[in-house]
Image (cartoon, rainbow, N blue to C red):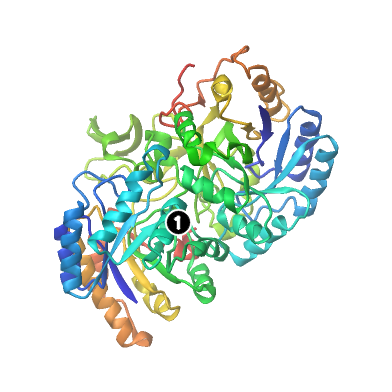
Amino acid sequence: MELLCPAGSMPALHAAIEHGADAVYVGLKDQTNARHFAGLNFTPAELAEAVRYVHQRQRKIHVAINTFAHADSWQYWQRAVDQALRAGVDVIIAADMAVLGYVHERYPQVELHLSVQASATNAAAIEFYQQFGIKRVVLPRVLSMNQVRALARTSSVDLEVFAFGSLCIMAEGRCYLSSYLTGESPNTAGACSPAAYVRWDEQDGQLESRLNGLLIDRFAAGETAGYPTLCKGRFQVGHDTYHVLEEPTSLNTLSLLPELYREGIASLKIEGRQRSPAYVAQLTKVWRQAIDAVLSNPTEFTVAEHWNQVLAGLSEGSQTTLGAYHRAWK
Amino acid sequence: MQFSLGAIQYFWPKAHVQAFYRRAAESNVDIVYLGETVCSKRRELSLVDYLQIAHQLREAGKQVCLSTMTLLEAPSELRELRKYCDNGEFMVEANDVAAAQFLREQQLPFIAGAAINIYNQHSLRRMISMGLKRWVMPVELSRHWLQQLLAQPLIADIRDCFEVEVFSFGHLPLAWSGRCFTARSENRHKDQCQLCCINYPDGRPVSNQEGEPMFVLNGIQTQSGQRYNLVNQLHSMHGLVDIVRLSPQSALYSDQQDTFAWLEKFRANQLGAAPQPLASSDSNGYWLQLAGFKQELG
């Protein structure tokens, strides 16, 4: 069971590898990946350097080229694939049939993973994407543990699941809420609730967060104010004001580790290419210890209290959840 | 230019659905999509019921297509999907690639719904080679995007091999989740939802704390708070769009504002001869390359 950690920068990549990641995933510095944020990601030269660093330590590096190509600029996606493979990366993660098909036909020997952005939530969808020679599927965060188990027992490709980090509550790759409010979505621009549209105002001692002018949340003095990701705002339904879609909280599957291991899940993905090297270091350390504990004795595994404390401290609103893995969340 | 009625996105009582399609049979709509696309727990109508309605609509001269579930998770949902794909009579709209997989296995032609991620000429071309005959463009794309895509030689050369359909009226389907937001709004767990969405025939509106419309909750689906309305953009669709889709709204008996009254307004304004005033709750942003909730004149 692989520990796959995020690296939005070279220091984060070093932190992940030093603290025990089996593999890291990165993106190029352009709109071809779903964390297209200012100051993040790798130029082709940096990517080549990252590959050398990772390979010297016998680990692996995956590159996400997982947005959907635009009609008039397909060559950027094509070029991203060419650059990544020239740099010597081990895996391409893609969602767009255009990119999947290009990699499969042009570079048939390259290991291809189906990005979570392709939204493959069932056995027939996985079968559909097998025409592109995919070796692994990253499962969307909408499935329950029972559903993950059912897929693990029938699927002929490896499965990767999200283990920790920001919780997308919608089926990834099929959520247009961000473009509805801002004109830019993960699919078209590689970002959700982009920072350029965020505004913070102080009104009568209350902090207000806005996205493209629309109020997303209000925070009383002393309340932790989170980034206005639009699905985590407080809105009104009828006479009630509450987190209509989801609370600000992070996914944490530590307690599911033995079960994920038993079902033969190939890889545990930690979300957070937008996070700092210190965050990546702390997370990687905890997950390395937890995975080693499962591998050495799967039946006796218990979640150490200090792991949970570290993870809670790194979570949105200091809260964690099992998300859709646990039926009651739904 | 043809006009279609998309599958009913909400959960309506069976009698309400049947009444709606009796009116559809009498209307001058060209194409009707039938089926449950949002939640497999909604079982007011079975596939057999839909097929019965399909036959009535076909006798009334309508082209009928079966529309399928968008977010498929359980093996039981795939078995039900298989039955839709095996119906033997009507073309199927695939709202997940699972349906496209079942249909291509049988070498049957299919329609790719708006929730299938086709954003460029290469993915469209690949789907055409798998059997796609009609493409419903993702809702977040604009006229500009569509025009650029269709102008690519890879597509322009085979433009007569497929049709283009655009979602043009109704609350836009924007997201699907493992969680049921309607049940959550009533403090229920999804497993004990008691099908409470049947009490909200137009979904549950969500506004922000300043009272501006944000979204509409429709079970596991989240829709746009604004009603998308391209009635005044039809003239800009000529040469690009073959079929204009209206999504059924529930206001069945208030004759001025209902889906069929709007169908007439759309038909009348195909060439821009009868522009319609838009309500402040209407939007057209996506088509005009703006944020989806925006409304612009023209």
Side (left or right) of A256 relative to B125: left
Q: What residue type is labelled 1?
A: Gly
Residue in the picture at 63% in, 12% down: B274
Residue for point 28% across, 44% down: A227
Query: Which residue: 51% across, 72% down?
Result: A155
* Residue farthest to the top, as pictured: B273
Query: Between B282 and B240, which is closer to the camera in this rendering?
Result: B240
Residue A111's x, y, as percent? Answer: 37, 67
Counting from the top left corner in percent of width and height, residue A40 is at 21, 49
Q: Is residue A19 at all visible to an observer of this figure?
A: no
Residue at 37% in and 38% down: A184
Q: Can residue A84 be seen in this view?
A: yes
Q: Indicate the position of residue B266 as horizontal and vertical percent values.
A: 64, 22
Other-residue count near label 1 (Cα within 10 Å), few / some / many at <14 / 14–19 / ≥20? many
Left/right placement of residue B171 relative to residue A326 reads right
Residue A54 figure quarter: bottom left
Q: Position of residue B204 (x, y in %)?
A: 55, 39
Name the residue beneath numbered marker 1: A101
The quadrant of the picture occupied by the N terminus of chain A is bottom left
Q: Relative to B37, say whether B101 is above or below.
A: below
- The local secondary structure at tag 1 comes to helix
Chain for mark 1?
A: A
In this rendering, is residue B140 above or below A316? above
